[in-house]
Amino acid sequence: MAIDYHHLKALHFEPVRQQYSARDSMLYALSLGLGNDPLDHSALSYVYEGKDGQGLLTLPSQAVVLGYPGFWAREPDTGIDWVRLLHGEQRMRLHRPLPAAAQVVGHNRVTHLTDKGEGKGCIMVTERRLETTDGTLLATVQQVSFLRGDGGFSQTGQPTDTPLPALQSTPEDSAPHFTDIQATRPEAALLYRLCGDYNPLHADPAVATAAGFERPILHGLASYGLVTRALLRQCAGGDASRFRALDIRFASPVFPGETLVTEIWRVPGSQTHYQLRAKVQERDKLVLSHGFAELV
């Protein structure tokens, strides 16, 4: 079945209601390595509710795992060649700090389908508005997917959308203002999958090998969470309430147990905007690129 622009844009997603607890928030933080150092007081508030009487804090990037509608692209009526789908970018804006525990509602829709041409694929953007049950907007999450097998639909007379504004590459002519180094644990993907993404690619060596990897890979959104943590630690004094937005491109997978090096540049003339990228130390491999972040 060929991709149908009008069908995908009109897809109806039932609101995703999700109750998450303080335990879920702690598990999310632990899966990203917070607590690996038991004496790291900046991490303790995200994995322990009793620090200094302030209560449990929540990492902003947890919003990307809440209100998720599941891997709907593999449903036959979408016409999507889901086996060739790649998660290309993740963009998120937080409108207010996430509670440590809450009932939330995810409202999902397809907002953009941009035809790159036959043989070149299609760019699909799905948007999720994460709200409380009383309608208070917590976060706007955009997932940019590259549908490698679904280009050329506009040649049949169907519309094609103007893409989102392109993310900018990090400076090549200057050293980063901040560098953050985070070691990941060998079981990191097995922990992170408990936050809701049970794709066997991240757990089963046989599945990973069949997909062309030497072993299971870390979830892209786990890498996104690690970079969020690096940004807060280096540029916000660990204060999650200062986070507003993070957009980034996935360049290459991370293997659990590798060391992530995040490089951050201040945007000239701004005290709140940053550019960033991340590499794997062991392979000197760029894994996250074209990052843009906003703090307050």
Image (cartoon, rainbow, N blue to C red):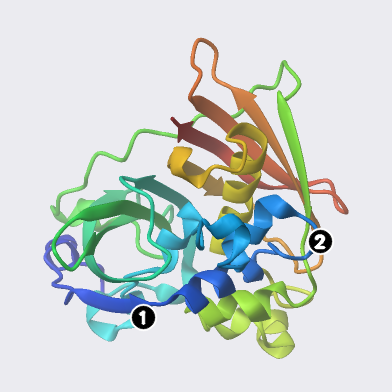
* Residue at numbered disc 1: 74
Residue type at tag 1 = Arg
| Left or right: residue 271 compared with residue 160 | right
Q: 294 or 203: nearer the eye?
A: 294
Q: Position of residue 124 (x, y in %)?
A: 33, 56
Residue 211 in view of the camera: no
Q: Residue furthest top?
A: 269
Residue type at tag 2 = Glu
Residue at 22 percent across and 64 percent down: it is 132
- Against 137, residue 245 (above or below) is above
Residue 234 in view of the camera: yes
Q: Residues within 10 Å of mark 1 (few under 14, many from 20)?
A: some
The quadrant where residue 186 appears: bottom right
Q: Residues within 10 Å of mark 2 (few under 14, many from 20)?
A: some
Q: Position of residue 174 (x, y in %)?
A: 73, 17
Q: Secondary structure at mark 2?
A: loop
Residue at 56 percent across and 71 percent down: it is 26
Residue at 64 percent across and 39 percent down: it is 277
* Residue at numbered disc 2: 258
